[in-house]
């Protein structure tokens, strides 16, 4: 009798059905491409369920109109949405690709929000699970569909909320969160997940226009920026606004950003991947002369080989790309002067060719000048205005006075001509304690994932 009354666990409740091709021995990487003449939600769900190669899945949906793909992802197969099968698959590459199609990230399955399913389902990989949660939140999934008491409070307050919350009194979007789900959430909610939900609830919501630009230019990965740099909300928000504003205007001039503060160097080196653009990162500590950066001028020995920056600009002429010049302040005045033209109007000439050659179109280049220059000012500003600030009130702080100070510092170091070509100076501040805690937590999860992998 007790077995009959036993209610299924949350794990059992959220288990998707096992799907199979009509021919049981069909391999998903063969069966899915064969259906290239039509978009079949069922075949797509089966391929996801059977572990089809991510590249095969992505290439399959790319053949069809965006609206058809969006509808297919929300289509139900055996009572569940195709996108739910994708989340259950837990492949970050597939989820990132599907998010380009603007499906409803707040859709529901099993009677619960998709973000809750991502959190509560049994994970194959702890890291991949968190990456999927981050992607959904970065693309607008509402963190408040899960009661705030379960992720924003202290551990003691969360424990009290488990039984004190009454689902009947919760707002309509949270009424699904009955006691069994609250206890499962408490078990699943770790340090990083808690931070992601808090981050999503506190940063400025992206406008519809920004989302449209991100999808049209395949830059949705950049939407994750507020989740990637704990304690750098002001800088990351400024980068987002600057990049999306520049691309929305479709301007015919290069974009030049200076990342002031050593904490911005890591982001600078990853901007290419976040924007899905070709990128190069060059260290001006070593490439600190015009010849080292661009190569010898025409007629000099070694001219035919060019230089790292020269060759990258020629290979990517006319296309949007990213050039990151790290420790820019370590280059000499000769280098700074050589960049004036190409950073101003995008004019450049391949040094491997002789006089009279056609110019190289560099008007769509995004330049990032990064390094520790300005650390003294950013650290002082942090101590004076941010160190003791409530993180939720961080956007109330204006960084304009700091940007003005940094501009004067740049002008004294690089000349007014170089500084005048910088569109935006983005300050980066010392990392708070939470950044170290999140890094340590990720390392622990990676070790746990590694330990549970099968031994070959």
Image (cartoon, rainbow, N blue to C red):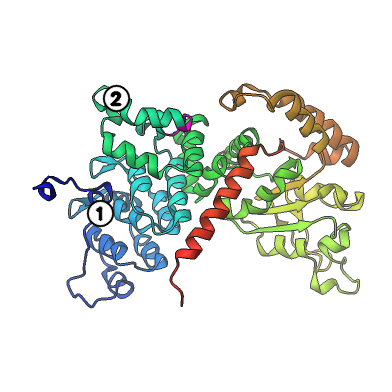
Q: Earlier in the sequence, mark 1 or mark 2?
A: 1
Q: Please check the rendered image and state whether residue 153 is part of the magenta-colored stretch, yes or no.
A: yes
Q: Position of residue 362 (x, y in %)?
A: 70, 53
Query: Is the C-beta separation of discs 1 and 2 under 8 Å?
Result: no
Q: Position of residue 152 (x, y in %)?
A: 47, 31
Q: Position of residue 383 (x, y in %)?
A: 75, 28
* Viewer-nearest residue: 30 or 378: 378
Local SS, label 1: loop
Q: Residue at x 24, y 61 (%)?
A: 40
Q: Residue at x 72, y 38 (%)?
A: 430
Give the CA separation, mark 1 to mark 2.
Answer: 26 Å
Local SS, label 2: loop
- The reply to whether residue 320 is in sight is no
Is the stretch drawn in magenta largely helix, strand or loop? loop
Q: Position of residue 282 (x, y in %)?
A: 76, 58
Disc marking residue 15: 1
* Viewer-nearest residue: 449 or 232: 449
- Up-down: is 4 above or below 313? above
Q: Residue at x 72, y 52 (%)?
A: 324
What is the span of residues highlighted in magenta in the rendered image?
151-155
- Up-down: is 193 above or below 443? above
Left or right placement of residue 332 versus residue 181 in this view: right
Give the residue number, with chain letter if any, for mark 2: 170
- The reply to whether residue 26 is in sight is yes
* Viewer-nearest residue: 211 or 79: 79
- Up-down: is 178 above or below 81? above
């Amino acid at each position: 009798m007790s077995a009959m009354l036993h209610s299924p666990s949350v794990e059992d409740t959220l288990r998707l059905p096992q799907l199979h091709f009509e021919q049981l021995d069909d391999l998903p990487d063969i069966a899915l491409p064969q259906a290239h003449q039509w978009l079949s939600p069922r075949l797509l769900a089966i391929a996801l369920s059977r572990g089809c190669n991510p590249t095969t899945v992505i290439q399959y949906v790319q053949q069809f109109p965006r609206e058809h793909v969006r509808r297919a992802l929300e289509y139900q197969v055996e009572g569940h949405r195709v996108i739910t099968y994708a989340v259950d698959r837990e492949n970050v590459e597939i989820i990132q690709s599907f998010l380009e199609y603007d499906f409803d990230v707040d859709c529901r399955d099993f009677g619960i929000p998709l973000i809750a399913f991502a959190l509560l389902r049994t994970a194959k990989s702890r890291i991949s699970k968190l990456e999927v949660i981050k992607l959904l939140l970065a693309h607008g999934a509402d963190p408040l569909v899960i009661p705030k008491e379960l992720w924003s409070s202290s551990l003691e307050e969360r424990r009290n909320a488990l039984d004190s919350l009454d689902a009947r009194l919760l707002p309509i979007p949270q009424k699904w969160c009955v006691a069994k789900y609250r206890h499962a959430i408490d078990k699943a909610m770790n340090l990083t997940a808690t931070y992601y939900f808090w981050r999503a609830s506190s940063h400025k919501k992206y406008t519809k226009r920004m989302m449209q630009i991100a999808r049209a230019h395949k830059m949705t990965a950049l939407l994750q920026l507020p989740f990637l740099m704990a304690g750098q909300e002001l800088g990351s928000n400024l980068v987002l606004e600057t990049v999306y504003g520049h691309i929305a205007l479709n301007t015919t001039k290069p974009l030049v950003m200076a990342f002031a503060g050593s904490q911005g160097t890591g982001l600078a080196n990853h901007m290419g991947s976040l924007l899905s653009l070709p990128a190069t990162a060059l260290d001006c500590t070593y490439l600190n002369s015009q010849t080292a950066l661009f190569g010898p001028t025409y007629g000099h020995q070694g001219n035919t080989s060019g230089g790292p920056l020269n060759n990258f600009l020629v290979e990517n002429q006319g296309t949007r790309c990213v050039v990151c010049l790290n420790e820019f302040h370590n280059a000499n005045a000769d280098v700074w002067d050589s960049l004036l033209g190409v950073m101003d109007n995008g004019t450049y000439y391949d040094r491997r060719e002789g006089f009279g050659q056609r110019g190289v179109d560099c008007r769509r280049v995004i330049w990032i000048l990064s390094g520790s220059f300005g650390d003294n000012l950013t650290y002082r500003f942090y101590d004076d205005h941010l160190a003791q600030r409530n993180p939720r009130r961080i956007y109330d702080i204006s960084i304009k006075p700091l940007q003005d100070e940094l501009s004067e510092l740049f002008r004294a170091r690089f000349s007014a001509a170089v500084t005048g070509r910088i569109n935006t100076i983005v300050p980066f501040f010392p990392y708070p304690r939470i950044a170290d805690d999140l890094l340590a937590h990720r390392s622990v999860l990676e070790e746990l994932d590694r330990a549970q992998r099968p031994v070959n």
